[in-house]
Image (cartoon, rainbow, N blue to C red):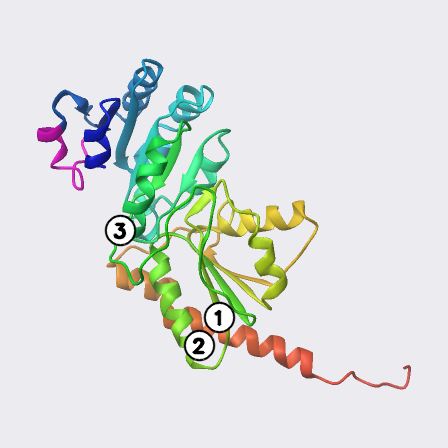
Amino acid sequence: MKQTALADERFVVMTAENRAVIRDLPAVLGPRFIDVGITEQNMIGMAAGLALRGRIPVCHALATFLIYRAYEFVRTDVGIGKLPVKLSSWIAGFLSDGNGPTHQAIEDVALMRTIPGMTVFCPADEQDMIAMLPEIWASPFPAYVRLNTRPSVIEHQPFKTGKVEVISEGEDVTLLVYGMLFEQAYKAKEILEAEGLKVGLINMRSLKPVEEAILKVATESKLLVTIEDHFLTGGLYSIIAEIFLKNQTTADVLPFALNERWFRPGLLSEVLNYEGFTGPQMAAKISEKIKEKNGVASQPKLVTANN
């Protein structure tokens, strides 16, 4: 973020008293760094005004307050005008591990992707995020980004808006994941491969726009698995369903998501374990699902007196 802002004086970084990952920017940007205090609605309104004046505002705040408290302003001031305001979302999803429902942003993807013109991105880790941000910030469209400073488990491929990152292809099962759960999905992939399965893994780093070529995976893999720290409704599972229905195709999909409830707070490792999102837990459920599928397929047809 710092290098991008320094290279282009149109950038203004704004925050609602949340400086944890941008603490070095005030001294570097001077008057182009604005802390509005705990007034997220004002920050978005000010950002819209700055954008109309030719600036590119980057608004950084806790995900829940950036999105939920200021939603009307994001929708009306930024969305309707399709202004190039960038929403830098901090501790979204399970990364808000120690907080209760009021601080859990697990419907953010659903809300942001419904705003016309808004783009939505969820990097897998810090390396992925650093590679993605320059193109996202340079875009003329408004953008929502789930920041992610988790360590990388792989060397990522170059980023392109609207494109997925195909880590591997597999005819038995393909894992579709975004954000910080990429690390756990990668662990699940390794476990399943050790069991002799052919496993695909796709980093869904760009959720809007999204690459509809994902349909190719649906026809080549026996089972699709969606993995997200988000409500089942409106997130990746819904995105895949919308694409499939639009193109009149279908697939066997196993979703890992939060269904009609918030997660139990704790340390991140505790949250993942309690909610069943660790690599080994997901691998076990996926393996069980594949065995069920194979068992049904291998059962002989029941012959009765009426046949």
Q: What percent of the width, then of the height, locates residue 113?
A: 48, 37
Decide: few, some or many residues near mark 3? Use Cα within 10 Å; few <14, some 14-19, many ≥20.
Answer: some
Q: Which residue is mark 3?
A: 126
Query: Circle 1 sits on which residue?
Result: 199
Percent position of residue 234, x then y = 51, 44
Of the numbered discs 3 and 1, the one sitting upstream in the chain is 3
Amino acid type of the residue that numbered disc 2 sits on in the rendered structure: Glu
Mark-to-mark CA distance, 2 and 1: 6 Å
Q: Residue at x 40, y 70 (%)?
A: 188
Could you classify mark 2 by the number of other residues whose Cα lies within 10 Å: few (under 14), some (14-19), or many (20 or more)?
Answer: some
- Specify the segment rendered in magenta: 16-28
Q: Is residue 45 above or below residue 136?
A: above
**Residue 138 colored in magenta in the image:** no
Residue at image location 16% in from the left, 41% down from the top? 20
Q: List the single residue furthest toward the top.
A: 53
In front here: 101 or 299?
299
Residue 194 position (above or below residue 105)? below
Q: Nearer the viewer, residue 8 or 220?
A: 8
Expressed as whole percent of the image width and height from the top left, the position of residue 166 reads 45, 58
Image quadrant assignment for residue 145: top left
| Residue 303 position by quadrant | bottom right
Nearer to the camera, 66 or 8: 8
The quadrant of the rendering that contains the C terminus is bottom right
Mark 2 and mark 3 lie on one chain; the one further toward the N terminus is 3
Please indicate whether residue 287 sits to the left or right of residue 153 in the image: right
Residue 193: image tag:
2
